[in-house]
Image: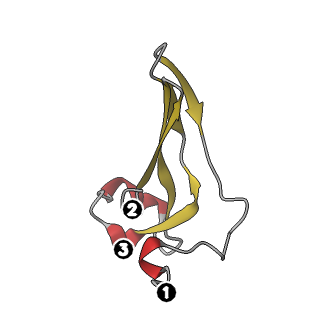
């Protein structure tokens, strides 16, 4: 995961590598008028809402035969039982 901006997943399937790369979805905040959109810059973070449970259109690349496909993603289940390495008990 790259901050709250993008997601890259690499799958190694016995010598056949596949890579998924996509940006997380973001929307312009409701408070901004459509006429002001043309003045927005990528550094205007306060003008956007991140939607980290969905992605924009990205790509799926098969590195073995160089095939590309479009891909989108969305979270369908939140697992509250995931334990990060830093949180694991040392007992």
In the image, is 46 to the left or to the right of 60? left
| Residue 22: x %, y % from top left | 48, 44
Q: Quadrant of the N terminus?
A: bottom left
User: Is disc 2 in contact with disc 3, using a CB cutoff of under 8 Å?
Assistant: no
Q: Which tag, 2 or 3, sits closer to the chain's start?
A: 2
Query: Any mark on residue 45, and which?
Result: none
Mark 3, Cα crowd under 10 Å, few <14 / some 14-19 / many 20+, is: few
Given this view, does label 1 or label 2 mark the residue nearer the observer? 1
Residue at image mark 3: 46
Q: Disc 1 or 3, which lies upstream in sequence? A: 3
| Residue at x 30% of width, y 66% of height | 44
Distance, label 1 to label 3, CA atoms, is 43 Å
CA gap, disc 1 to disc 2? 56 Å
Classed neighbour count for the residue bearing mark 2: other residues with Cα under 10 Å, few (<14), some (14–19), many (≥20)? few
Q: From the viewer's perspective, tell me whether residue 65 is left or right of residue 70.
A: left
Residue 36, numbered circle: 2
Q: Hey, which quadrant is residue 76 in on the image?
A: bottom right
Can you tell which of label 2 and label 3 is closer to the viewer?
3
**Distance (Cα) linking label 2 and label 3:** 14 Å
Residue at the spot x=59%, y=36% of the render? 71
Residue sitting nearer the eye, 50 or 20: 20
User: Which residue of the protein is positioned furthest toward the front in this rendering?
Assistant: 91
| 28 vs 85: above or below | above
Q: Secondary structure at mark 2?
A: helix
Vertical side of 67 occupied by 41: above or below: below
Q: Height in image: 21 above or below 87?
A: above
Residue 91 circle label:
1
Q: Is 78 left or right of 25, judged from the image as shown?
A: right
């Amino acid at each position: 995961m790259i901050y709250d901006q993008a997601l890259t997943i690499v799958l190694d399937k016995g010598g056949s590598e596949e890579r998924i790369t996509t940006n997380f979805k973001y929307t312009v905040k409701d408070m901004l008028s459509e006429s002001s959109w043309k003045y927005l810059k990528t550094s205007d973070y306060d003008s956007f809402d991140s939607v980290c449970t969905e992605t924009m259109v990205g790509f799926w690349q098969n590195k073995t035969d160089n095939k590309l496909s479009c891909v989108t993603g969305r979270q369908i289940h939140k697992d509250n039982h995931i334990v990060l390495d830093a949180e694991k008990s040392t007992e």
